Image (tube, rainbow, N blue to C red):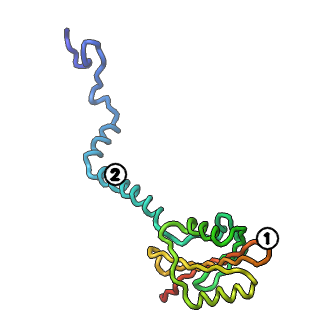
Amino acid sequence: MRRDSKTLDSRRVPVANRNSYPSIIHSITEFMKSPLPIILSSLASITLLVSPLSALEPSVPDFSNGMPDATLEKTEKRAEHETFHLGTALGSREFFATLEKFLGPGWGTRTLSQEEMLLAATSGRSSNAEVNLAAYENAQVPGVAIRVIHLKPKEENADSSVEITVMREHKNQ
């Protein structure tokens, strides 16, 4: 059996002539020989690795739309402090459990200052309510503290109110 330069075997499958390849294949081959594909694949890998990590980085929670089982009623902003007033039917224990899930990992309670304890006592007396206070911070979000006051009115069937203050340290520029 005679072998033709244009066929691969006896079944006469045509063999493509090198000149018949589109020029793009030659371009791709030349491109793959350069260091650019390695650089591009490295950048793509780094991007894929960094993206999920940045999504897990702790940040200041956004209370501007309220939170689960608590409705935003009012927002106040003063200098480095932003206060969110929420209404909720949750009792103190349930609310703080929901809050801790909302805050996410890394956020933990810190020791209350005398000023904060005095504020809670004053709030309770002026609103005739049972007061629970907690303050949270996260070592990975330096300069930010979150103070939460849960007020449960002593009246029957009244919803609780919550004051969440995000406090940022003043930075001199």
In-front residue for pair 14/165 = 165
Q: Residue at x 29, y 14 (%)?
A: 12
Indicate the amino acid at tag 2.
Ser
Query: Residue 101 is drawn in which quadrant?
Result: bottom right
Q: Which residue is mark 2?
A: 41
Query: Residue 75 is drawn in which quadrant?
Result: bottom right
Which label number is shown at residue 157? Answer: 1
Q: CA distance from mark 2 to mark 1?
A: 61 Å
Q: Left of 11 or right of it: where is 71?
A: right
**Dot 1: element:** loop
Indicate the amino acid at tag 1.
Asn
Q: Position of residue 28 (x, y in %)?
A: 32, 42
Where 21 falls versus 173 (above or below)? above
Question: Which of the two marks, 2 or 1, is nearer to us in this view?
Answer: 1
Image quadrant holding the N terminus, namely top left
Query: Residue 60 is drawn in which quadrant?
Result: bottom right
In-front residue for pair 22/173 = 173
Q: Residue at x 59, y 67 (%)?
A: 97
Q: Position of residue 71 (x, y in %)?
A: 71, 68
**Dot 2: element:** helix
Return the disc, 2 or 1, that comes first in the chain's sequence: 2
Where 49 falls versus 81 (above or below)? above
Q: Position of residue 8 (x, y in %)?
A: 25, 19
